[in-house]
Image (cartoon, rainbow, N blue to C red):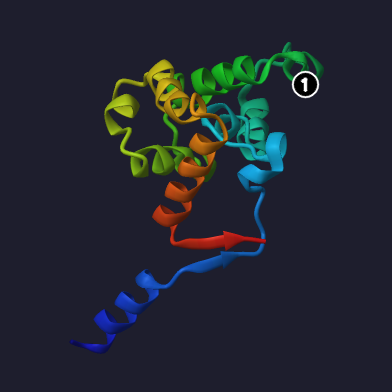
């Protein structure tokens, strides 16, 4: 093996510890934010939405909406009405692809994506823990601090 392939193999197989995260473990209850609506209402996407939103949309009106309604608005504005090319949008697409949801991305089917997450949510804490472990394993993260 050449040096580049050895280094690449070592780096890709090394788990990391996330020291700067917005994620908390399932044991933190309602502070454990996960799911498509949380991804779509991440502050970078909300900021991007407001850069493109009509001037008639006041932040106070937006934040008064349910999380799901906020996510619906962002999905439509940034993923349907425009091509999702920003780094924040690409992060959502990459996450969904990694979760095996390419067909739902291609169909632009937010309801189907929500149903995927519901399969974990319906199992309560066990489902959230299973989902979190799967995501961390996929990302090569041992744990978050």
At label 1, counting other C-alpha atoms closer than 10 Å, the crowd grade (few under 14, some 14-19, many 20 or more) is: few
Left or right: 61 with respect to 50?
right
Q: Quadrant of the C terminus?
A: bottom right
Q: Is residue 104 above or below residue 32?
A: above
Q: Which of 29 and 86 is in front in this view?
A: 29
Q: Which of 122 and 10 is in front in this view?
A: 122
Q: Residue furthest left?
A: 1
**At which x and y percent is residue 13?**
36, 71
At 51% from the left and 37% from the top, the residue drawn is: 126
Left or right: 66 with respect to 115?
right
Left or right: 75 with respect to 22?
left
Classify mark 1: helix, strand or loop. helix
Q: In this view, does 87 lie above or below 58?
A: below
At 39% from the left and 75% from the top, the residue drawn is: 11
Q: In which quarter of the image is residue 28?
A: top right
**At which x and y percent is residue 109?**
37, 18
Q: Is residue 40 above or below residue 77?
A: below
Left or right: 124 with respect to 98?
right
Label total for image: 1
**At which x and y percent is residue 105?**
34, 28
At 65% from the left and 21% from the top, the residue drawn is: 67
Q: Quadrant of the N terminus?
A: bottom left
Q: Quadrant of residue 79?
A: top left
Which residue is tagged 1?
59
């Amino acid at each position: 093996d050449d040096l580049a392939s050895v280094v690449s193999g070592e780096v890709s197989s090394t788990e990391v510890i996330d020291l700067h995260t917005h994620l908390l473990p399932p044991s933190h209850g309602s502070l454990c934010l996960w799911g498509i609506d949380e991804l779509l209402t991440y502050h970078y996407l909300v900021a991007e939405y407001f850069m493109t939103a009509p001037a008639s949309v006041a932040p106070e009106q937006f934040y008064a909406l349910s999380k799901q309604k906020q996510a619906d608005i962002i999905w439509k504005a940034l993923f349907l009405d425009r091509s999702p090319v920003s780094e924040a949008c690409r992060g959502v697409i990459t996450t969904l692809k990694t979760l095996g949801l390419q067909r739902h991305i291609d169909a632009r089917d937010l309801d189907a994506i929500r149903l995927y997450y519901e399969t974990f949510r319906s199992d309560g804490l066990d489902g959230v823990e299973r989902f979190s472990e799967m995501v961390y394993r996929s990302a090569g993260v041992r744990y978050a601090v």
